[in-house]
Image (spheres, rainbow, N blue to C red):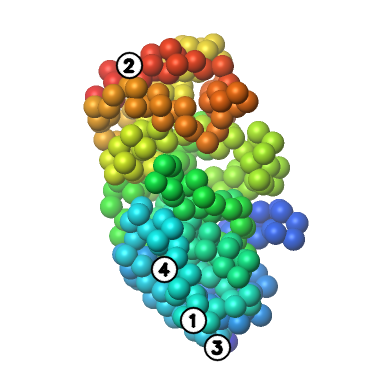
């Protein structure tokens, strides 16, 4: 247990901590945001009802070794067994082979239903460890500690866990809510600039789709300078949507896919190796805004103004890709309407969207031609 001095330090940090509640009844949980929160993992876990854990299995990205070590050190203070599972992470880790290897580590650690999995890393670690937690011995509790800005505002919250299949990304997964999420910006300190841009791109999505004030706030800062308040706002927006549509079957949660239809197609067409996810989302939002004007959901003037702001975000130039490949990837998107049509989330105004299942192949091709000219 923490010493008297440690309790005082925790109390000081707790006063500065920002908390977002995911109100999901018995599956509800808190996201704790603030400097030093990783070092308070044991206390926060106890507050989240995890003090009955039989053991902790900490699954970490070796590239995020400092955060991994801080988490392990904090959890050892509970006196419970802490099993360290370090991974060399790549997108290929999110596979049947990666999942099977992780199950093997859980079995070696004699993890049972009382165990708690703790994911420390970016989205790949969170997705893989979360899905392993959802399915190992029919489900164990887990904690998510994202170490990238993108994971903090996106994959670490909301309960979506998944691995990839050879025919598509995130095709095998489950909704399995974490018991606790800890967001500590100090774990982002060593991120390269592109990782900050990737997270920033996802944050801009929240502003454009849901919150005009957030959009304006984000335009005023560099990607590496976003603060806890802006991170908190993104997570709070997602919490409200997840509370209304936890399983993504009511059409409400689709709002979070603004910009993602073309983004996912671009990622697939480049074998997930050219763009960071949030970079692809920036390009996908440019496509969505262009389509929004084409479909008369917003004015051409608004579309041009938004596109100018998105064009200023530093993402790689659009690579040369056969339009047929993109069109085919769009047709395979998970967000399909009845009869196989693909639903697009399009812009009505800054902070407001509309779901549109009427976008035809001609419109997609015209939009791809726009991107080729605008993003070269």
Quadrant in the picture for residue 25: bottom right
Q: Find residue 79 and name its label.
A: 3
- Spatial distance from mark 4 to mark 3, Cα to Cα? 27 Å
Which one is closest to the eye, mark 1 or mark 2? 1
268 or 356, nearer to the observer: 268
60 or 30, nearer to the observer: 60
Label 3: element kind: loop
- Residue picked out by circle 4: 101
Residue 146 visible somewhere in the drawing: no
Quadrant in which the N terminus appears: bottom right
**Circle 4/circle 3 CB separation < 8 Å:** no
Residue at the far right in the pictured view: 25
Q: Find residue 109 and name its label.
A: 1
Q: Estimate the x, y position of residue 225 in percent, counting from the top left.
A: 38, 48
Q: Estimate the x, y position of residue 39 in percent, counting from the top left.
A: 47, 74
The answer to whether 65 is drawn above or below residue 233 in the figure is below
Q: Residue placed at 42% from the left, 77% from the top?
A: 84
Quadrant in the picture for residue 98: bottom left
The answer to whether 107 is drawn above or below residue 298 in the figure is below
Residue 155 visible somewhere in the drawing: yes
Q: Residue placed at 48% from the left, 12% from the top?
A: 294
Q: Estimate the x, y position of residue 90 in percent, counting from the top left.
A: 33, 56
């Amino acid at each position: 247990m923490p010493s008297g001095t440690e309790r005082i330090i925790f109390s000081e940090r707790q006063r500065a901590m920002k908390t977002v509640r995911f109100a999901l009844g018995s599956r509800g949980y808190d996201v704790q945001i603030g400097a030093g929160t990783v070092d308070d993992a044991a206390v926060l876990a106890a507050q989240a009802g995890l003090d009955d854990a039989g053991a902790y299995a900490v699954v970490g990205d070796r590239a995020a070794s400092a955060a991994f070590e801080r988490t392990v050190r904090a959890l050892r203070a509970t006196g419970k067994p802490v099993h360290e599972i370090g991974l060399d992470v790549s997108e290929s880790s999110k596979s049947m082979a990666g999942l099977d290897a992780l199950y093997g580590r859980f079995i070696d650690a004699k993890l049972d239903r009382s165990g708690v999995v703790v994911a420390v890393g970016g989205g790949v670690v969170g997705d893989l460890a979360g899905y392993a937690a959802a399915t190992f011995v029919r489900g164990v509790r887990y904690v998510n500690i994202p170490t990238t800005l993108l994971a903090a505002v996106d994959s670490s919250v909301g309960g979506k866990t998944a691995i990839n299949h050879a025919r598509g990304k995130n095709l095998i997964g489950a909704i399995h809510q974490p018991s606790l999420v800890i967001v500590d910006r100090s774990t982002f300190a060593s991120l390269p600039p592109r990782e900050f841009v990737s997270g920033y791109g996802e944050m801009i999505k929240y502003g454009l789709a849901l919150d005009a004030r957030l959009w304006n706030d984000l335009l005023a800062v560099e990607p590496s300078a976003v603060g806890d308040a802006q991170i908190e706002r993104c997570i709070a927006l997602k919490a409200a949507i997840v509370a209304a549509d936890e399983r993504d079957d009511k059409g409400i949660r689709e709002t979070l896919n603004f910009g993602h239809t073309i983004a996912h197609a671009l990622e697939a067409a480049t074998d997930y190796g050219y763009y960071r996810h949030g970079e692809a989302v920036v390009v996908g939002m440019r496509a969505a805004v262009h389509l929004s004007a084409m479909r008369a959901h917003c004015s051409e003037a608004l579309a041009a103004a938004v596109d100018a702001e998105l064009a200023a975000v530093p993402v790689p130039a659009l690579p040369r890709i056969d339009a047929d490949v993109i069109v085919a990837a769009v047709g395979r998107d998970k967000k399909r309407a009845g009869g196989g049509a693909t639903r697009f989330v399009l812009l009505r105004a800054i902070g407001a969207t509309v779901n549109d299942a009427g976008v035809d192949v001609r419109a997609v091709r015209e939009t791809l031609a726009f991107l080729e000219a605008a993003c070269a």
